Amino acid sequence: MLQWLLDRFATAPDRDAFVHRGRRMTYGGVVETVAGFSGMLKDLGVARGETVAILGDYSPEVFCLILALAQNGNVVIPLSRESVIEQAGALAISGCHWLAEFDESGSEASFLRHPVPVENALLAGFLEQGRPGLILFSSGSTGKPKAILHDLGRVADKFRKQRTNVIAIPFLMIDHFGGINTILAITSSLGTVVTVGDRSVSNICRAIEQFKVELLPATPSFLTMLIASKLDREFDLSSLKRITYGTEVMPQSTLDRLRAAFPRVELQQTYGLSEVGVLRSQSRGDGSLWVRVGGEGFQTRIIDDILWIKSEYAMIGYLNAPSEFDEEGWFNTQDRVETDGEWFRILGRVTDLINVGGQKVYPAEVEDAILNLDGVDDVAVFGEPHALLGQIVVARIATSRDEDETALKHRVRAACRLKLAAYKVPSKVLIAEGPLYTARQKKSRRADVAP
């Protein structure tokens, strides 16, 4: 099914495909490892159209097994140990025939029959085709993860056109659509995938320095932490040519600090959703958050300030929820945007809006105002129920200053009054005792997380 990709790998057998925690594997090694897994699947009797869950993170062997399963016409369910849903819960939705669990190094796997029967008409219809599939789980704005079924062959087809090869770190996890998209983009162009044991700021910086990484795809939350840590001054990050950011709204203050810290690095905003894929994007060259998105296979339109997308690489559907595509194949992203001709500025997800007495507040706008304050390393803004107003604005702040909560509240509120309307000024200011981001390095704006 993905023979074109393996044929491309075979043209560069001596080039490094992976540097996994310092261990190298060439593209020739990838081709051989895929062939080895294909033989193993045949010996075990893994049939076309069966589903296989893979528990692990990025490693050459995990990637090679995914390719071997695609060649065999299987549906892959990648699960990391920090998935948005527990393994048992995921498999209760997707079903399963086999389970491959990789060890901590990512090089050795136990492969065993693990039947979890489910009745799902959409999945059953897809399995009958014997095409390679991919099931991913979204975090879900309602707290209930959605199981998203993709045709893996169609996902990979976007990368048939070979692009410039780069050395890059796949930042998003392998059970995230952005993670799959990144690893296919790097390898289809015969670039080098550099992986780290964990995605801490220091580990990422160390890998960039050691392996001369050229591309860093990251979240705005991670980049905010990078700037606050000042580790960009302790490590040699001069090999970086491009930093891409997406999955959440980027604060303008963080973008400004990135431009100052990396004046010769291209900063590019990306945009994509698990349901429709990752669009090609171009950031406007004025240091702003305006971006142009689309590209071959994608169409965009705006309805009532909400971005809608039509994609040739769209999912087959949800396994546990009704389709959110209209009859013409358009998907409502739930992202509110401003427009300037062909340029978009993403304001935030509709589901993240805070309703203060009928007035709408975008958390990212308030966060941006607070991030400019001295001693503020990061901030998460969210709504809290209120008997009269419906909701009030709450800011949870990570600070490097020795400052009591009352003094911080006065300083934050005073700064916000200068830049924001009164209803956007936080009614509560809390000092965070732990990180403000999830294991996926995205901002956590949940009100029920203890400060």
Image (tube, helix red, strand yellow):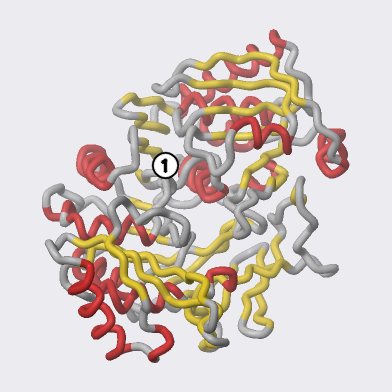
- 283 over 317 or under it: above or below: below
Residue reaching furthest to the top: 43
Where does the image place residue 24, in percent across and percent down from the top left? Answer: 35, 26
Query: Looking at the image, which is closer to me, 414 or 344?
Result: 414
Where does the image place residue 402, in percent across and percent down from the top left? Answer: 12, 62
Where does the image place residue 376, in percent across and percent down from the top left? Answer: 22, 67
Residue drawn at (60%, 47%), measured in percent from left and top? 160
Residue drawn at (48%, 52%), measured in percent from left and top? 163
Q: Residues within 10 Å of mark 1 (few under 14, many from 20)?
A: many
Query: Looking at the image, which is closer to me, 412 or 30?
Result: 412
- 62 over 194 or under it: above or below: above
Asked if residue 292 can be seen in this view, the reply is no
Rendered image quadrant of residue 141: bottom right
Rendered image quadrant of residue 65: top right
Disc 1 marks which residue?
A: 191
Amino acid type, residue under disc 1 in the picture: Gly
- 347 over 177 or under it: above or below: below
Query: Looking at the image, which is closer to me, 448 or 314?
Result: 448
Q: Is residue 230 left or right of residue 165?
A: left
Query: Looking at the image, which is closer to me, 443 or 58?
Result: 443
Q: Is residue 416 left or right of residue 11?
A: left
Residue drawn at (18%, 74%), measured in percent from left and top? 407
| Dot 1: element | loop
Where does the image place residue 400, in percent across and percent down from the top left? Answer: 16, 60
Q: Quadrant of the C terminus?
A: bottom left
Asked if residue 31 can be seen in this view, the reply is yes
